[in-house]
Each structure stands twice: as structure tokens, then as C-alpha cells.
Image (spheres, rainbow, N blue to C red):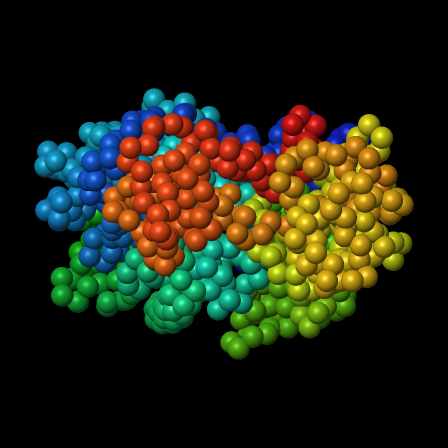
């Protein structure tokens, strides 16, 4: 637990107020952004804009077009393709992205996930030799490869072309690969270069499919968060959209994993991905093989997903036990060193996969640079990981000792190395001397700073709704965009105690509705009780729900014990009449990232629903995005409910309910007989307080027609999309081409075999049915006595010659804009269409 941090900057109150008014944002949020260097309206607007249309396009990546052309050649020639990944969360999600992409193209590819223990990190010559011998003609690396000069040279010389997709630092000598797709390549024109491996793989998928593969945003998000990449610029856009996709329409493997981890995916955020999903995926590579992670993330089988998730959960528990075991042995070695300058601990055959975690734990406890080494009993080689603290550059501190190392690499904050066990004592002495000479760097704040100092009045006004608003506007949080840290100075804490099985968790109570928590800090409870109000805390804000009661929760990151006369230096924007934002329910919200529609096909009552905004429910809509739309005859307040289920609570009001699908309208009318469902503008009669658009229109003009005549102040957008229709809309041109190719390879397909044929083509029955209708219109196929037969004499013509295909293309465009776009995008689309 740190006891030093940088106080927030002193801000001009009038400037904050003016910016807040101009941007229609709470002053608290503006103050946080100004403290982080965004001091004008343009900069703040740019930061808050998470519209995917701002994303860098694939043409900015060096060699991406060359890579796509080579892959298409391999597909045409039926060459064997292998994807070569890595064993961490970024690596397995990168592999999964390409496996899903090739599946969408109707192709099964091999993939290889290296072993941390037998292969090591990055290209492995022995594995490349095996892949050549096994007949691989095209190797695609993801999240690795940029250092493989010798390995790539061998592959290219033996008839295996290599496409490298990587994001790690570029070495002085680049491999002579067929193509190198890297955002920081000297010939790249990417303005932003710090994508994760999964981010680079996402762009290759984009290039192959032709359209942005929004269905892969979830995997790119997990990889980006897992590799602790900066959540700014393009990464912020990717992750914001990916989190919404996970919330709305999670893949089977994530659903199964989240259920065991007790994570509510509908409310998941970057923190829960970082501390709930990523460690579980990482645990596989730390303990054994990471290959099952790819299977988990790409399966379409419920039972398979559940089985793999169970295995992952068991492996994660095993990983936790290994961490506990190694940490306890390391702490025993340090029992007589309460304040070490630097730590080098080693043990016989400690689990290599957890050494970095143990090093981080020891850094947290002792606040000094730490190396944790495992000595192999058979070879006497010590291999391990190191972590730094403050501004101490661990890599440079060890660089002048690397002649003693067998392997060495890393950066300022973390290193990996191996050396003979006889060298450990010298290594310890060297690191301790370096730490002694750079003690001020070790005790530096390392960027830990306060974004805002909350006054007692502001603290008392904290609510879960305000905290949700902070997360919605400023998130997703992570590297380079951390959760705001708030200072809590000299407050009347009611209680401090150590809780948990091992009494290692610190819990404080400020008010019945505000609590504080810190992990592995239970030992501070007695001292905090004694200090009373003479303590300053630094912490981020969250919420905790227990037994249907939600409280404000402060996650403590720093503690300063004060003398009665001492007060931490702080600066905050002084509140005006009320510290609470003037408008808890924003009337003009941020441009939010597109989100995929949820599985709201069920018409059963939902656990969450919106309701008429009455004085007693003023904050009911605070968690939903809203906007104002100006139409010629009416201004609408628009509420984004596209992630909600349609249930009885939504249908209990005397509102107007519009269904574009007459069959859905009939089904709902039979179930909810008290509601009058409208399916044509002519049925509109008396204006009501609100109008609910239940489903998506088949044509944009249908929605436009209603907006021209509605006399209602508020619109709720549910835009439910039937699962069968969603499946059809996800069908892309490359999949249709692959399907036609498969049909032409068959002499005939019996009608009763169509379901099995759809599975073979990695399509759903609905997608196959759509494809057959398109091909029938083009005379490419025909049904002959309950058999599907290819017409090989058909005249070649484009897919756009099919009316069904053209209708689907128009629906896809509407779906992308209406179901996935921000409210501002939806409004622009409707006015321009």
C-alpha cells in the first residue's frame, strides 16, 4: 500500500464551470479531465467520442494488403494454413480471431499455441521445422514473430511462407517474411501504434472479410485488456465497443466461464475482464497448455463450452494454489528482512508460470524491486521474473550484469531472465547495490496521483448513480486511462476491520451507504482505528451490491497517516450550490460505442426495464444513454433501451407500442392483451406520453414515416431483432461465396441432409436457407425432387442481381446503424437515408 501520491492540480473554478456548461457535463468529470491534461472543449469531445467510425482503417497497416492477397491465394489453391499464437490471453484471443475469421470464410485452419515450458516465448525453430514437415504452406503468426529472424528464414527457404502479425517492439533486424503486419513498422501510416496482438489480428480479419468484423470486437477487447495496452485512441474505441458486445451478446465460452466466475456479463466492465476473465485464460498457459482457451472462445457447442470452462476454472484454482505456495516460501526466506532494499528469492522447482505474479505480490508488500527465481533440479539453471516499483528501471539496472545471464529481456517495469544458480548471490548483491544508489527512484510515486479531492459535502453526496455516470463517460478504464483516484481527507470513519478467511482484506465504514476496501491490507486496521479522522486515503470509486442493496465502495490505493496539524496538499474544484451533478440523467449523452443487440428474443419479464419518468423516479434513466432528436414537427427525448429484454414491466404503461413485424405484434398481443400494439402509422390515434419501438424495421422508411407524424415527447428504442434474422444479417459475402463453392463440390444434397450440410459449412439453418434463396433467384441452384442441385451451366452474374440479396444488404446497413450505432449515429442515419 503506497503512502505517497501527487495531489491534483489547482484548477480555475470559473474555467471548469464554463467548460462543464459548454459540454453539458458534470463539473466533477470536467475537473478530472482537465487534471489529466484535457483543457479545452475540442480535446474533451475527442476523448469522449468512442464512435467506431473514427477507428483507423486496415489500409494504414504495412503489408496488410499483401498478407490478404497471399491468404486468398492459399484459399484458392487449398494450401495448408497454420496460425501460430502465444500462451497468454492476448495470444489465445488473437488465434481465436483468425480461427473465427477463416470459419466465416468456410475454411478450417490448424493452429498452434506454444507451451511456456517446452517452447518458450515467440518463434521456436523446432516447431517451425515440424510445421514445414507437416505440410504447412502458409504460416500466420499472431502476437509474436517479429524477433524470429532465423526461424522465418528457415521457413521461407523450405517452402513455407510466413505472414507476421505482431505488436511487440521492433528489433534492429526484421525477419525476411512474406509480409509483416505491424502498426509501428517504419512504412506503416497508423497514427496510433500500440495495439495488442489481438488488435492487429482484428485488422487482418477486417482486411480478409472486407467489412469491419464487429462480431470479433469482444476477442480484441479481451486481448487488449489482457496485455495491458493503453486504453486511448483506437484501443479505447475497440474496447468500448467490445465491452458493449460482451454485455449484449456474449459468445458461449465467455458465458460459461462467467457463470463459474460469478460475473454478470450484462454489467461487465474492463476491470472485471482484467481481474476475472483474463487471469482464467492466462492460468492455462501458466500451468499447462493454453490450447483449450482457443477452443473455449470459438466453440458453438453449449456442452463443450461448459466442459472447457469447468477445466479452466479448476486450472485457475490450481494456479492460485501455486501462487500461495510459492509466495509463502518466498516470504519465509524474507522473514528476517523487514525492509529489504531489493529482493532476490529463489526456490527449487518453483512453478515457473506463477513467478511473475509472486514477484508482483512481493513488490506490493515490500515496495522494492523484486526477482523471483525457480532453480531446476536437473540442470541447476535458475529461471524467473522480476517486477519493479516507482520509477526504478529494472531492465537498465540489470543490463550491465547480463553477461552472467543465459537469457534476458524485458522493459523498465518487468524482466525475465535465466542464469546458473551459482550466480544468484552475485545477482542479489548487484540488484541491492543498484537499488541503494537509486533509492529516490524506488520511493517515487510512479504516476500514482489524485484526480480530485472530494470535500466532506461531496463525499456525503456520492451515489451509485453518479459513480455509474463516471464510468460510462470516462471509461473504459485501464492503462493510460486509469479509474479516477479521489482523495478522502480527514473524514469521520466509523469502523475499520480485517475481514476474510485470512483476515487480509481491509474494510472501512464511513456511512451506512459508503464503505472502503483494500485487499492484502488487513494489517492496517488497528492503526486506522487508532488514527481516527487523522488519515488521508486515495482510492477509486465503485459500487457493491449485496442482498439487493447497492452501496458506494471506495477501493483504497493509498493511505497517509497524519499528525493533527498535518493536512495533505490537495486542490479541488469548489462545489457551487450542490456537489451533485446538476442533471443526473443526461439529456445529451456521449457518443457511445456501437453495441451488438442482446439475446432479447425472449418475451418473458426482464429483471430490468424502464418506466415513465416520474418525480419519484428521476434517476431511473441515469444508466441509459439518452439524446434529443429534433424532427420538423416534434422534439423527442430518446432513450436507448437496446440492451433490455422486453417484459411485462415495460408493457404496463399507457404508451404507444410500435411493432414493425406483424407476426411479432400478433404474438405479443395474445400475451399482453391489455396493450394495443401498432403495426402501421394509420393506427395511431391519441398522442401518449411515450412511444416504444419494439423491433427493427425492415425498411428505414417505415421508421421515418412514424417519426414524421408522432406527437410524443419521449421515444424508447428497443429494436429487438429475432435470432433468425440476426443470423441472416451476420452472413457476409465471403461466406456466401464459400457456400456456393461447397454446393458446387457436391453432386446433390438431399433435403433431409441440409441441416447436416449447414453444420459442415459452419452456418446456421437460417443462413443456409437464405443462401439457397439467393442462389435460386440467380439460377445457380435448384431443388430437384427434394434435392438441392447445382446448376453448373448457369450464367455468371453478381450477387446483387438477386432481389433477396439486395434487400438483405439494405437490412444489414440499417442493422449496423440502428441496432449498433450510437444515438447520434442513428439520428444522422435516419435524416440522411
Q: Residue furthest bottom?
A: 501
Where is the N terminus found, in terms of image quarters? bottom right
Give x and y (percent) for residue 126: 13, 48
Q: Is residue 107 left or right of residue 89?
A: left
Tell how many labels.
0
Q: In this view, does 268 lie to the left or right of 124?
A: right
- Who's the residue at 47% across and 33% down the image? 802
Between 114 and 647, the one nearer to me in the picture: 647
Where is the C terminus found, in terms of image quarters? top right
Q: In which quarter of the image is residue 378?
A: bottom left
Q: In this view, does 501 lie to the left or right of 494?
A: left
Between 310 and 600, the one nearer to me in the picture: 600
- Who's the residue at 89% across and 45% down the image? 686
Give x and y (percent) for residue 266: 59, 57
Between 126 and 246, the one nearer to me in the picture: 246
Give x and y (percent) for residue 520: 52, 66
Give x and y (percent) for residue 710: 82, 38
- Who's the residue at 13% across and 45% down the image? 135
Between 247 and 182, the one nearer to me in the picture: 247
- Who's the residue at 72% across and 68% down the image? 549
Q: Can residue 152 be seen in this view?
A: no
Q: Can residue 380 be seen in this view?
A: yes
Amino acid at each position: 500500500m503506497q503512502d505517497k501520491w501527487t495531489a491534483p492540480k489547482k484548477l480555475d473554478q470559473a474555467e471548469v464551470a464554463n467548460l462543464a456548461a459548454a459540454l453539458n457535463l458534470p463539473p466533477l468529470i470536467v475537473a478530472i479531465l482537465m487534471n489529466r491534461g484535457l483543457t479545452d472543449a475540442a480535446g474533451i469531445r475527442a476523448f469522449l467520442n468512442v464512435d467506431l467510425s473514427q477507428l483507423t482503417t486496415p489500409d494504414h497497416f504495412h503489408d496488410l494488403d499483401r498478407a490478404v492477397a497471399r491468404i486468398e491465394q492459399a484459399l484458392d489453391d487449398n494450401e495448408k494454413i497454420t496460425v501460430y499464437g502465444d500462451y497468454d490471453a492476448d495470444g489465445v484471443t488473437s488465434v481465436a480471431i483468425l480461427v473465427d475469421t477463416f470459419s466465416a470464410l468456410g475454411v478450417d485452419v490448424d493452429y498452434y499455441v506454444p507451451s511456456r515450458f517446452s517452447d518458450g516465448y515467440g518463434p521456436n525453430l523446432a516447431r517451425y521445422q515440424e510445421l514445414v514437415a507437416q505440410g504447412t504452406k502458409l504460416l500466420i503468426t499472431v502476437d509474436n514473430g517479429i524477433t524470429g529472424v532465423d526461424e522465418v528464414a528457415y521457413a521461407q527457404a523450405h517452402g513455407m511462407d510466413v505472414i507476421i502479425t505482431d505488436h511487440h517492439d521492433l528489433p534492429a533486424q526484421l525477419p525476411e517474411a512474406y509480409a509483416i503486419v505491424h502498426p509501428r513498422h517504419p512504412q506503416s501510416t497508423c497514427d496510433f501504434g500500440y495495439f495488442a496482438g489481438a488488435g492487429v489480428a482484428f485488422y487482418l480479419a477486417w482486411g480478409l472479410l472486407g467489412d469491419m468484423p464487429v462480431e470479433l470486437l469482444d476477442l480484441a477487447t479481451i486481448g487488449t485488456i489482457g496485455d495491458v495496452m493503453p486504453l486511448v485512441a483506437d484501443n479505447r474505441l475497440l474496447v468500448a465497443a467490445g465491452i458493449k458486445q460482451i454485455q449484449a451478446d456474449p459468445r458461449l465460452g465467455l458465458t460459461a466461464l462467467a457463470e463459474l466466475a460469478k460475473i454478470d456479463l450484462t454489467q461487465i466492465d474492463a476491470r472485471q475482464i482484467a481481474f476475472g476473465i483474463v487471469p482464467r485464460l492466462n492460468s492455462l498457459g501458466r500451468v499447462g497448455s493454453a490450447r483449450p482457451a482457443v477452443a473455449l472462445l470459438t466453440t458453438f457447442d453449449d456442452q463443450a463450452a461448459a466442459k472447457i470452462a469447468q477445466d479452466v476454472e479448476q486450472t485457475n484454482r490450481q494456479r492460485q494454489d501455486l501462487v500461495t505456495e510459492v509466495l509463502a516460501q518466498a516470504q519465509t526466506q524474507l522473514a528476517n528482512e523487514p525492509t529489504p532494499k531489493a529482493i532476490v528469492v529463489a526456490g527449487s522447482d518453483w512453478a515457473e508460470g506463477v513467478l511473475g505474479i509472486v514477484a508482483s505480490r512481493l513488490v506490493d508488500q515490500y515496495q522494492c524491486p523484486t526477482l523471483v527465481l525457480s532453480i531446476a533440479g536437473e540442470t541447476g539453471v535458475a529461471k524467473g521474473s522480476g517486477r519493479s516499483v516507482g520509477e526504478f528501471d529494472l531492465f537498465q539496472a540489470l543490463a550491465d550484469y547480463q553477461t552472467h545471464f543465459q537469457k534476458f529481456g524485458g522493459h523498465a517495469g518487468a524482466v525475465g531472465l535465466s542464469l546458473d544458480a551459482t550466480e544468484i548471490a552475485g545477482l542479489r548483491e548487484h540488484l541491492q547495490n543498484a537499488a541503494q544508489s537509486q533509492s529516490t527512484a524506488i520511493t517515487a510515486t510512479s504516476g500514482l496521483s489524485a484526480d480530485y479531492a472530494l470535500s466532506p459535502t461531496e463525499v456525503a453526496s456520492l451515489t451509485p448513480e453518479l459513480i455509474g455516470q463516471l464510468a460510462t463517460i470516462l471509461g473504459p478504464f485501464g492503462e493510460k486511462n486509469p479509474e479516477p483516484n479521489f482523495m478522502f481527507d480527514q473524514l469521520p470513519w466509523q469502523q475499520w476491520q480485517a475481514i476474510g478467511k485470512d483476515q487480509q482484506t481491509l474494510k472501512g465504514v464511513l456511512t451506512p451507504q459508503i464503505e472502503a476496501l483494500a485487499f492484502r491490507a488487513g494489517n492496517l486496521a488497528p492503526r486506522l482505528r487508532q488514527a481516527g479522522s487523522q488519515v488521508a486515503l486515495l482510492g477509486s470509486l465503485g459500487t457493491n451490491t449485496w442482498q439487493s442493496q447497492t452501496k458506494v465502495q471506495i477501493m483504497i490505493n493509498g493511505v497517509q497517516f497524519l499528525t493533527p496539524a498535518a493536512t495533505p496538499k490537495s486542490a479541488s474544484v469548489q462545489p457551487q450550490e450542490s456537489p451533485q451533478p446538476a442533471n443526473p440523467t443526461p439529456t445529451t449523452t456521449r457518443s457511445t460505442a456501437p453495441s451488438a443487440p442482446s439475446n432479447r428474443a425472449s418475451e418473458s419479464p426482464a429483471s430490468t426495464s424502464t418506466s415513465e419518468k416520474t418525480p419519484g423516479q428521476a434517476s431511473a434513466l441515469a444508466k441509459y444513454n439518452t439524446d434529443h432528436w429534433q424532427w420538423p414537427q416534434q422534439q423527442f427525448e430518446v432513450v436507448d433501451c437496446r440492451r433490455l429484454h422486453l417484459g411485462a414491466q415495460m408493457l404496463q404503461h399507457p404508451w404507444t407500442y410500435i411493432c414493425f413485424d406483424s407476426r411479432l405484434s400478433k404474438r405479443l398481443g395474445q400475451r399482453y392483451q391489455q396493450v394495443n400494439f401498432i403495426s402501421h402509422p394509420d393506427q395511431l390515434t391519441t398522442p401518449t406520453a411515450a412511444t416504444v419501438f419494439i423491433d427493427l424495421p425492415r425498411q428505414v422508411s417505415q421508421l421515418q414515416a412514424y417519426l414524421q407524424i408522432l406527437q410524443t415527447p419521449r421515444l424508447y428504442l428497443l429494436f429487438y431483432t429475432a435470432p433468425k434474422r440476426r443470423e441472416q444479417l451476420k452472413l457476409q459475402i465471403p461466406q456466401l461465396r464459400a457456400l456456393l463453392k461447397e454446393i458446387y463440390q457436391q453432386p446433390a444434397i438431399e433435403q433431409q441432409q441440409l441441416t447436416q450440410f449447414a453444420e459442415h459449412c459452419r452456418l446456421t439453418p437460417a443462413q443456409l436457407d437464405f443462401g439457397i434463396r439467393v442462389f435460386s433467384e440467380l439460377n445457380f441452384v435448384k431443388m430437384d425432387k427434394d434435392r438441392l442441385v447445382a446448376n453448373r451451366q448457369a450464367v455468371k452474374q453478381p450477387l446483387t442481381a438477386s432481389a433477396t440479396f439486395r434487400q438483405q444488404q439494405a437490412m444489414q446497413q440499417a442493422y449496423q446503424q440502428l441496432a449498433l450505432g450510437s444515438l447520434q449515429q442513428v439520428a444522422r442515419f435516419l435524416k440522411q437515408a
